[in-house]
Image: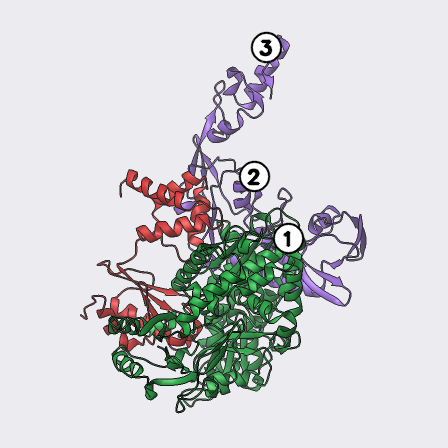
Chain colours: A green, B purple, C red
Amino acid sequence: MKIRSLEDLEEIAHRGIQKIKGEKIRIAVGLGTCGIATGADYVYTYFENAIKDLTERVFLTKVGCFGYCSEEPLVKVTIPGKPLTILSKVNPEETEEILRAVLSGEIPDKKALCKIEEWNHITEYMVYGKGLANIPSYSDLPFFRGQLKLVLRNAGLINPEDLEEYIAIGGYKSLHKALNMKPEEVIEEVKRAGLRGRGGAGFPTGLKWEITAKNESDEKYVICNADEGDPGAYMNRNELESDPHAVIEGMIIGGYAIGAKEGIIYIRAEYPLAIKRIETAIKQAREYGLLGENIFGSNFSFDIKIVKGAGAFVCGEETAMIASIEGKTGRPRPRPPFPAEKGLWGKPTSINNVETWCNIPIILAMGGERFSKVGKENNAGTKVFSLVGEVKRIGLVEVPLGTKLKTIVHDIGGGSPSGLKVKAVQIGGPSGGCIPEEGFDTPIDYESLRDLGTIMGSGGMVVMSEKTSMVETALFFIGFTSEESCGKCTPCREGLKQMLHILHKILSRRGSEEDLKLLEELSMTIQTTSLCGLGKTAPNPVLTTLRYFREEYEGLINDGKD
Amino acid sequence: MVKIKINDQNLYAREGENILKLALKEGIDIPHLCYHEIFEEPYGACRLCIVEVIKDDERFITTSCTLQAQNGLEILTQSPEVVKHRKILLELYLAQAPNAENIKKLAEKYGIEKSRFPKRAFVTDHLNGKCILCGLCIRVCGEVMKAGVINYIGRGPSTKINTPFFEENPDCLGCLACVNICPTEAVSAEEVENRKILKSWSETKVKMKECKNCGSLFTTYPLWEKTKSLLMEMDTELEELCPNCKRELLIKKLTKNLPLPKPY
Amino acid sequence: MNNTKRAKELEEIILKHSSPAGRILSILEEIQEREGYLSKESLKYISKRLNIPLADLYSLVTFYSFFNLERGGKHTITVCMGTACYVKGAPKIIEELERRLGIKEGETTSDGIFTIKSARCFGACSMAPVVRINERIYGYVFPESLPSLLKLYGWKEK
């Protein structure tokens, strides 16, 4: 059916609710890439076989990832009238026992991680039920206590391959609302929210849209940057795998606001599951008339196309991405002109990160004013981080901006797993830097991180313990950016190659004071004179480790002197 | 017109005018390698043309080839910051293209005798240890000559310029625009018997065209094919002659009132 | 593959990807998906057919690390070299793989069974270190666990 009105939407929502908390027992297996890598697909198959004759009573489904990666595979069980329960580290062999228990109305305590009695999807409020006293509540778990799930509000709870479930939790209501506003009113709302680009640079999204909207042209484009390239970062992968319709809804609203009829999702080829889920979601949205001609019966038409990247980190840079979509090598070009003026095929284009797009339906649902109150002044909203490395509790963590680094590393992450001291956190991937423990009191916002010599980046957060060598870490990142440099401008191509050479020299204890000086001088020149953001930020891992861990470099130099 | 200031010099410029182009026209020396006036769009790869922009209390470094004239723009082309970074860039160039004479000269001008970076190691190099990957040869071949014989291969530190699959490319016109535009004289070609050999481009060979009258090799075959119809609607008599013989025959036709070819 | 058959397949792929955004990449990706790599013949065909100089096409495919110009092994083992995997010892996994299979990264075993590659990041950082064999991702892989993993793909210890 084609959805034409709010009533149509509600009718589908009703069907979706039946799946989420209907009369049947719901067993939902978390099938994100992380879950599958730990065998969640086998868990699903085992359940599938076991319930063959029980489909009258049990509804088995796939959901995305709930973010607590170190507890995967996660299975969410909902017995009608009772809280939703999350079971962790589920083995295929345990499925039978679990099934037996839930059929008799019980939850196997020893597998239960936590329960959810009610849940705020922002676009909808879901009440599951009370009870199960001996299972801890979601918010009692240290991993979840400091978190605020806005972007990840649906991840791991709904089936990303089922549009009806997305609509059940209030999906596409924001779009309906937006289409009943004037485009400039939508932009005003996003501006009022104070949302800044979640790709890392933090440019105000509303302003970007406004500039693109004001540039007159017969054709305009919106692009979703899903070329998540930072090693150690996988927020965007999860957002696409677990809640693809949120991205699509955000893009349709954006297209309406700036006057674009076509959207493009540029996604890295390394994410096959995310590609599959977003393809399915687009197909369903078309079937229901949420993409295509005359959306919601309005005179606004919009469609989305997927373009797969082909393995080049630099294509995350917007002018390189445009070149890549146009079928050229992804080499950046000088800006201005900015894409808002001359973008894809020379037309005004707004490029926003996956997570930025995810925030749009939330802003419409909450209202810009209320959204702006979340987080910190001038840093509104939340940010998702992938907390990995030498940390006890690994996973995707969403916190209000302004949360202190130590809250994430120690309270949520639980510090180092091995009893070793946490030494630093690497933020912002190859464009970011290493923050020492002394800096953990810093609130996470765009400006504070910049003052520490790093950037917000897309949200990678790799914890390093005292056994990690900071010089080796710097070498790793310079090796990465050098390899991924497009090779167009000299400071980036030749400069990073020489930095790598000097770092190798220092690590093999053949370095001198002069080398250290040259390394610093060269870093400054690469930072100042490179053509694009890749080169401009590439020296950050070296500059921050030199700033906070200089003694490690000096130690290696002095070692060589003996 | 807008008023701008380069170093101590006040100048008038068209709004949006390219600052590097303007400075060069005014005789202000800004070193550059990847800029060439035949191209409309700046490429911004060599980064040598950096200047310091002074804007209110703010100062920043940017390339002059991508800078546009605006009223009140004030720039310095040789400030200590500019010189500092330019010197590092020149050291990088010296290491990358140790045989490029004009890079050596430019470095000397900035007081650099020797690069602190190790020279690129190579046994043989199709570009003679002189290529700085500025891309001018690629652009002139593709955008101006529309031949597209060469391009970048690979990316990052292993970027090269050559023909696809490192094989002779039959698309080559033998026009030598690449040889002529190269700022470091890296591209080499020679003429052997009746062929031009693009030594730098996988030894691509291009057949020469012989003058039907005197037998001299006056152009390459593909260039002759491409241009023969461009200038004049030839009569077949003129078509296969070298410029000298062509001139002679034309004079003969003029003086003896023979029918002339129609201008294009 | 003979030329007529190739031309027919390529025409089919070209027709399938007709909208301009991302067209060239999609075509090349699909050819690689079907043939396992991008052969010189296919590239030459595409160059002629879409009127793109071969030099530009070759430049494109050598720029993106996803494209292979040579046929790979039956099973491609890709070791993730992202930050989290690196910190947790990914370089040692590559070393061990190279030792066990007797080839270097980027090479294929002489029997054409295994190819070793490395990747930037699969975004499965929580399971670091991570190895992908063909399409399946394996988490928590350590040098000691490689033999049993390889055996799943028919490898025999010598």
Percent of width and height locating residue B104:
59, 55
- Between discs 2 and 3, the one toward the N terminus: 2
Q: Is residue A319 visible?
A: yes
- Please name the residue shown 56% across and 65% down the image: A174
Residue A341: image tag: 1
Answer yes or no: do the residues labelled 2 and 3 have beta carbons within 8 Å? no
Residue B164: give x, y in percent of width and height.
42, 45
Residue B166 visible in the shown view? no
Gap in angstroms between the C-alphas marked 2 and 1: 26 Å
Instruction: Please give the count of numbered marks on the rendered protein.
Output: 3
Question: Of B205 and B236, which appears nearest the observer?
Answer: B236
Q: Give the Cα distance between marks 2 and 3.
A: 35 Å
Please give the label number shown on residue B144. Answer: 2
The three-letter code of the residue at mark 2 reads: Val
Q: Is residue B215 above or below residue B200?
A: above
The numbered mark 2 sits on a residue in which chain?
B
Q: Are marks 2 and 1 on the same chain?
A: no
